[in-house]
Amino acid sequence: MRRSTQRIPVAKEGAIFILPLAALSLILWILWFTACAGFFSLLTLFVVYFFRDPERSIPPGEKAVLAPADGKIIKVEPCWEEYLLKGPTLKVSIFMSLFNVHVNRIPLTGRIIDSSYQTGKFIRANLDKASTMNEQNALLMETPDGTRLLFVQIAGLIARRIVCWIKKGDVVERGCRFGMIRFGSRVDVYLPANTRLQAQIGQKVLGGQTILGVLT
């Protein structure tokens, strides 16, 4: 997947926000509206910070499931996923605040065999009902040995745009970038029920780097 080779420190999707803010800040400085110029300059810096896209060292282990997002684990529980996996799973929910990196990464190497996008509400992403009621984009993947894994991008209270760079049929590599959610959100991961979990509630994770569990 070509997206994984990018080396820029800021996601290009941020350009439509960063460039206008930077231009407005410059104009305000030129016109000596210093208070307004200072405010918009700080806002520009924050937006650049939000869209940062650092490189990550991908840990070895073909069966080690990587966190698809930066943030804090807010839920780890067995459940029945009835839409795409249609069976018993282990659900891990990662909440991304405004201050986390929002570029998402592939948990395992495999092929995207199904996807589903649904419109919805914009409830706070750290609430349980956000998993079913909010705007979301679900991706079902299958590893070379036939294991299936589901990961779902979920918009939050502020987010109004889910970005996904992959589609059904794509072959993707573990740790590669696959999308992002703008301005606060959540990612739910549905693992096979027999996964040896390492994820813990309250744990802070890094997308493409922290191991959530190991397939058996």
Image (cartoon, helix red, strand yellow):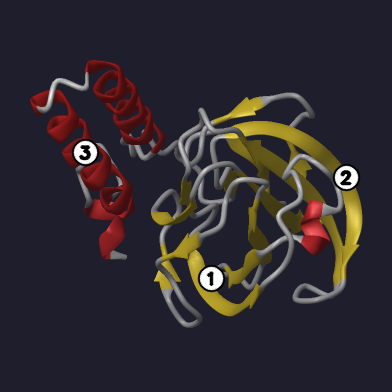
Q: Secondary structure at mark 2?
A: strand
Is residue 30 shown to the viewer in this render? Answer: yes
Q: Is residue 92 above or below residue 98?
A: below
Which circle marks residue 144 in the picture? Answer: 1
* Crowdedness near tag 1: few (<14), some (14–19) or many (≥20) residues, C-alpha within 10 Å: few
Q: Secondary structure at mark 1?
A: loop
Considering every residue shown, the one lying at the far left of the view is: 30
CB within 8 Å, label 2 to label 1: no
Residue labelled with disc 2: 77
The residue that appears at 65% across and 64% down in the rendered structure is 136
| Quadrant that contains the N terminus | bottom left
CB within 8 Å, label 3 to label 1: no
The residue that appears at 26% across and 50% down in the rendered structure is 15
Between the C-alphas of marks 3 and 1, the distance is 50 Å
Q: Nearer the viewer, mark 2 or mark 1?
A: 2
Q: Is residue 34 above or below residue 113?
A: above
The residue that appears at 36% across and 40% down in the rendered structure is 51
**Residue type pointed to by label 2:** Glu
